[in-house]
Amino acid sequence: MSTNSETGAEVREVVVIGSGPAGYTAALDAERYLVALGDMEARAAAVTV
């Protein structure tokens, strides 16, 4: 399980706001990081602007 370092709350989803391929790549990196921490159900999504 991933948690917020300030509140200790469980992190279940990460939203990355970016532009084009960079935003998508950042979301993939965030998801890989959460999975590496052991949270196999965590998800990351990219929102492009």
Image (spheres, helix red, strand yellow):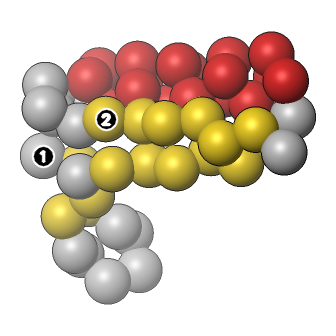
Location of mark 1 (residue): 1
User: Which of 16 and 11 lies nearest the eye of the viewer?
Assistant: 16
Q: Which mark is residue 18?
A: none
Categorize mark 1 by other alpha carbons within 10 Å: few (<14), some (14-19), many (20+).
some
Q: Earlier in the sequence, mark 2 or mark 1?
A: 1
Q: Nearer the viewer, mark 2 or mark 1?
A: 2
How far across and how far down the image is residue 4, in percent?
35, 67
Q: Is residue 31 above or below residue 48?
A: above
Q: Residue at x 85, y 24 (%)?
A: 20
Q: Residue at x 33, y 50 (%)?
A: 13
**How many numbered callouts?**
2
Q: Amino acid at mark 1?
A: Met
Real-space Cα distance between discs 2 and 1? Answer: 12 Å
Element marked by disc 1: loop
Residue that appears at 13% across and 32% down: 41
* Residue sticking out furthest to the front: 49
Quadrant position of residue 19: top right
Residue 27 sits in which quadrant? top right
Left or right: 46 in relation to 25: left
Task: Please tell me which residue is depicted at 52% across the width and 50% down the height of the picture.
Answer: 15
Does 18 sit left or right of 3 as displayed?
right
| CB-based contact (under 8 Å), mark 2 and mark 1 | no
Q: Where is mark 2, residue-wise?
A: 43
Q: Amino acid at mark 2?
A: Arg
Residue 39: horizontal and vertical position, in percent?
Answer: 16, 33
Q: Position of residue 14 (x, y in %)?
A: 44, 49
The image quadrant where one finds the C terminus is top right
Q: Residue furthest bottom?
A: 7
